[in-house]
Image (cartoon, rainbow, N blue to C red):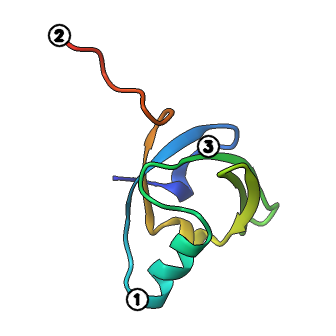
Amino acid sequence: MKTLREVAVGSSCVVKKLHGEGAVKRRIMDMGITKGVEIKVIKVAPLGDPMEITVRGYQLSIRKADAEMVEVVPGAPGVSAPLK
């Protein structure tokens, strides 16, 4: 399982699943981070927290503790593996 926290600066990924419960999960969803949305990591603060991402056309800073609750897959939305 790869989380948003592990994505390298300059890379894009797609949200696969949100972990967490209650208010924490709701706060992440209210920020626009939902299943299937593309996220690009713009930069990480010098001391490692927070990280700046682009989601749904706007820039957002998110704590690494919250980023760990976002399970992602590399790539862009709508792109699937070729059929064999």
Q: Secondary structure at mark 2?
A: loop
Residue 18: where, in percent of width, then height? Answer: 40, 66
Q: Is residue 27 above or below residue 81?
A: below
- Dividing the image into 4 quarters, which one contains the C terminus? top left
Q: Residue at x 72, y 49 (%)?
A: 57
Residue under numbered circle 2: 84
Residue 78: where, in percent of width, then height? Answer: 42, 32
User: At label 3, which amino acid type do we have?
Assistant: Ala
Residue 76: where, in percent of width, then height? Answer: 51, 33
Instruction: Return the residue found at the far bottom.
Output: 23
Q: Residue at x 74, y 66 (%)?
A: 61
Residue under numbered circle 3: 8
**As drawn, is 52 to the left or to the right of 4?**
right
Rendered image: mark on residue 22: 1
Q: Secondary structure at mark 3?
A: loop
- Label 3 Cα crowd, 10 Å radius (few <14 / some 14-19 / many 20+): some
Q: Is residue 38 above or below residue 22?
A: above
- Report if the CB atoms under discs 3 and 2 are less than 8 Å apart: no
